[in-house]
Image: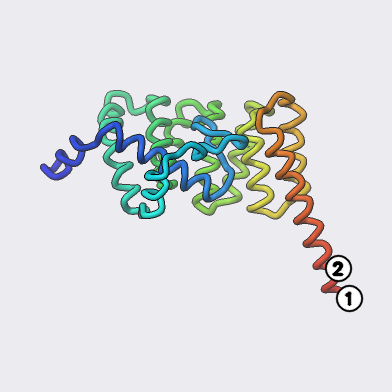
């Protein structure tokens, strides 16, 4: 490690770590409603709801390069710890989550894959990896991994929620998305985000009806 890198690592403080986390949550909510299975926030309660104004301003000026730099610094001690046990599932997931929150999705996927190699039935990690695939632009793999997660835990809230979003926004498959979200509501009657899911179902159906009407008008 160079002297510059050592100084940068030493300058990493708890305040900076908190700032990175909140900034990334702000950016994530701005990009859509998909949520991490093992992260803070929920469809009913976006994690940025109580973010301070100063952090919101910081998020607006944060470049992908700066986010990556901050994530690399924060990941450094975790990577050193990982050398003791390269198959430590919890540690691999933590590093994956760190890069996910910094929007470094290929790096996040790499660590999630390593964790799942050791524990393939971990639905939190698989859901997070699937969502990272979605944000990286690979819709088909995202759907495959979300469905595989459901094969282990069929009624998992975050997995069903995210699958519905990808089916709707990624494939424009409203019937599939509505069916997925309805299953979420039916199998999780006490889900605190019920109102949000019901709103999304209504929006998806409305957009589908608008598209059908446009198609009918175009064929006249």
Give the residue at the far left of this rendering.
Answer: 3
Residue assigned mark 2 = 216
Give the residue at the far bottom of this rendering.
Answer: 220
Disc number placed over residue 19 in the picture, else none: none
Quadrant (top left, top right, bottom left, bottom right) of the N terminus:
top left
Q: Give the residue drawn at x 36%, y 55%.
A: 61
Above or below: residue 211 compared with residue 135 = below
Where is residue 77 shown, x and y percent of the image?
Answer: 26, 31
Q: Can residue 65 be seen here?
A: yes
Where is residue 170 shown, x and y percent of the image?
Answer: 63, 53
Q: Secondary structure at mark 1?
A: loop
Q: Can residue 108 be seen here?
A: no
Q: Real-space Cα distance between discs 2 and 1? A: 7 Å
- Label 2 with label 1: CB-CB less than 8 Å: yes
Assess disc 2: are there few (<14), some (14-19) or many (≥20) residues with their C-alpha within 10 Å of its C-alpha: few
Where is residue 30 shown, x and y percent of the image?
Answer: 52, 49
Q: Give the residue drawn at x 31%, y 28%.
A: 82
Q: Is residue 170 left or right of residue 185?
A: left
Assess disc 1: are there few (<14), some (14-19) or many (≥20) residues with their C-alpha within 10 Å of its C-alpha: few
Q: Give the residue drawn at x 52%, y 38%.
A: 49
Q: Nearer the viewer, residue 145 or 164?
A: 164
Q: Give the residue drawn at x 65%, y 45%.
A: 165
Q: Secondary structure at mark 2?
A: helix
Q: Is residue 80 left or right of residue 23?
A: left
Residue assigned mark 1 = 220
Above or below: residue 135 compared with residue 12 = below
């Amino acid at each position: 490690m160079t002297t510059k890198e050592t100084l940068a690592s030493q300058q990493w403080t708890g305040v900076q770590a908190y700032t990175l986390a909140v900034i990334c949550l702000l950016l994530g909510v701005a990009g859509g409603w998909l949520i991490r299975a093992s992260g803070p926030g929920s469809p009913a309660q976006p994690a940025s709801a109580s973010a301070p104004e100063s952090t919101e301003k910081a998020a607006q000026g944060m470049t992908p390069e700066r986010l990556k730099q901050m994530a690399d610094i924060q990941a450094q001690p975790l990577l050193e710890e990982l050398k003791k046990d390269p198959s430590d599932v919890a540690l691999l997931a933590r590093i994956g989550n760190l890069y996910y929150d910094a929007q470094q999705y290929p790096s996040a996927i790499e660590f999630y894959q390593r964790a799942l190699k050791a524990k393939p039935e971990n639905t939190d990690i698989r859901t997070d990896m699937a969502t990272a695939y979605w944000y990286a632009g690979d819709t088909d793999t995202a759907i495959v991994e979300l469905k595989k997660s459901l094969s282990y835990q069929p009624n998992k809230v975050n997995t069903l929620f995210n699958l519905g979003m990808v089916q709707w926004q990624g494939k424009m498959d409203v019937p599939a998305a509505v069916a997925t979200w309805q299953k979420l509501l039916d199998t999780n009657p006490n889900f605190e985000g019920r109102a949000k899911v019901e709103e999304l179902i209504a929006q998806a159906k409305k957009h589908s009806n608008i598209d059908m009407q446009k198609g009918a008008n175009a064929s006249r």
